[in-house]
Image (cartoon, rainbow, N blue to C red):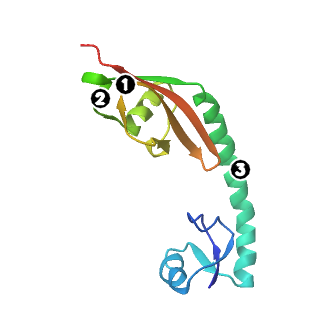
Amino acid sequence: MKLVLTDDVKGLGHRGDVVTVAEGYGRNFLLPKALAYPATTGNVKRLEQEKKRYDARIEHEKDQAAAVAKSIEGAKIVLHKKSGENDSLYGSVTSSEVADALEAKGITIDKRKIDLEEPIKRLGTHTVHVKLHRDVTVALVLEVRPLAN
């Protein structure tokens, strides 16, 4: 079944791509969720026009994300957490704690954009990636120190 994607679908393609998928996947998932249209000539032309507007909007969002990335780049965040023996933390550092620390520095970022590859459960310096846009990812340094009693 040939379909034209109306939005990015992970593992399949980007908006405006013409893809060939299994009948069931297209009929039961993509079409009901309005993630794709049948690849007719009318739908292809309509999506080409929409794609131009979409590309302009995405480029604008990418420029904004790059500006935020410049402000984050090289930033160092220090968090104080309660720790036990062998520099291990009680609990772990969460993405919302990192987002709150960034907000204290004047940078507002949604916690879902902060990519913690694995939970931070030890004291020390860690690198945290922030995905601001699908093409813009920035790394920041996170230092976890013991909480002074």
Looking at the image, residue 73 sits to the left or right of residue 47; the answer is left
Give the residue type that dot 2 points to: Leu
Q: Amino acid at mark 1?
A: Leu
Q: Which mark is residue 123?
A: 1
Image quadrant occupied by the C terminus: top left
Q: Nearer the viewer, residue 144 or 88?
A: 88
Residue 82 shows in this picture:
no
Q: Position of residue 55 (x, y in %)?
A: 72, 57
Q: Secondary structure at mark 2?
A: strand
Q: Residues within 10 Å of mark 1 (few under 14, many from 20)?
A: many
The correct choice, above or below, for 76 with respect to 121 in the image is above
Disc 3: which residue: 59
Circles 1, 2 touching at the beta carbon (< 8 Å): yes
SS under mark 3: helix
Instruction: List the residue tagged with mark 2.
Output: 89
The numbered dot on residue 105 is none
| Closer-to-camera residue (119/86) | 86
Q: Taking 12 as reference, is 2 above or below it?
A: below
- Residue drawn at (63%, 43%) of the image: 136
Secondary structure, mark 1, is loop
Circles 3 and 1: CB distance less than 8 Å? no
Where residue 29 appears, as percent x and y from the top left, is 49, 77
The amino acid on which the numbered mark 3 sits, given as a three-letter code, is: Glu
Q: Residue at x 50, y 35 (%)?
A: 128
